[in-house]
């Protein structure tokens, strides 16, 4: 990451996707450049996480993400090195847009939760900051 991290937790935000309802159930469609402000290059999901547990303590240098609780509920701790906030996700038509340079932790999973992640880039280990102390050093540059 060249220079100080440019984003704050206030650049991250909740997005409510369209929900089409009929008596047979609901559907939410996600489209690159329309409902998602980036082209999705990777999709993955987390599941079978024991109730109350957490995942994902890291930051990305360039990657953007949308995190969606497609089933169950969990919290996302956002941290920019100065400010912290917790966002609760519990609806499959609500997504949390996370910009690059934000430390995130997924915590307090309810039993049976499924967390869907839409990512702006393919997996690249060099894009990760996995140690919180290293992250804090990057935010101070």
Image: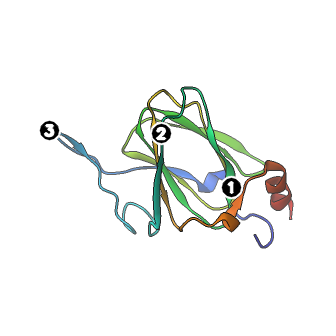
Residue 12 shows up from this direction? yes
3D distance between C-alphas at marks 3 and 2: 26 Å
Q: Which mark is residue 129?
A: none
69 or 20, nearer to the observer = 69
Residue 7 shows up from this direction? no
The answer to whether marks 3 and 2 mark residues whose Cβ atoms lie closer than 8 Å is no
State the residue position of label 3: 24
Residue occupying image coordinates x 86% and y 65%: 141
Q: Which mark is residue 59?
A: 1
x, y (%) of residue 126?
70, 67
User: Which quadrant of the view contains residue 135?
Assistant: bottom right
Q: Is residue 75 above or below residue 28?
A: above
State the residue position of label 2: 47
Left or right of 52? Residue 33 is: left
3D distance between C-alphas at marks 1 and 2: 21 Å
x, y (%) of residue 17?
36, 51
Residue occupying image coordinates x 72% and y 52%: 80
1 vs 2, front mark: 2
Q: Is residue 84 above or below residue 65?
A: above
């Amino acid at each position: 990451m060249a220079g100080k991290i440019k984003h704050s937790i206030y650049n991250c935000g909740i997005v409510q996707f369209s929900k089409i309802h009929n008596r047979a159930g609901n559907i939410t469609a996600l489209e690159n450049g329309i409902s998602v402000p980036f082209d999705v290059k990777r999709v993955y999901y987390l599941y079978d996480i024991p109730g109350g547990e957490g995942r994902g303590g890291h930051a990305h240098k360039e990657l953007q993400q949308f995190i969606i609780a497609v089933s169950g509920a969990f919290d996302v701790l956002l941290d920019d090195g100065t400010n912290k906030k917790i966002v609760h996700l519990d609806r499959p038509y609500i997504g949390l847009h996370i910009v690059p340079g934000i430390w995130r932790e997924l915590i307090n999973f309810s039993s049976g939760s499924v967390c869907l992640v839409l990512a702006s880039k393919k997996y690249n280990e060099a894009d990760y900051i996995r140690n919180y102390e290293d992250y804090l050093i990057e935010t101070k540059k």
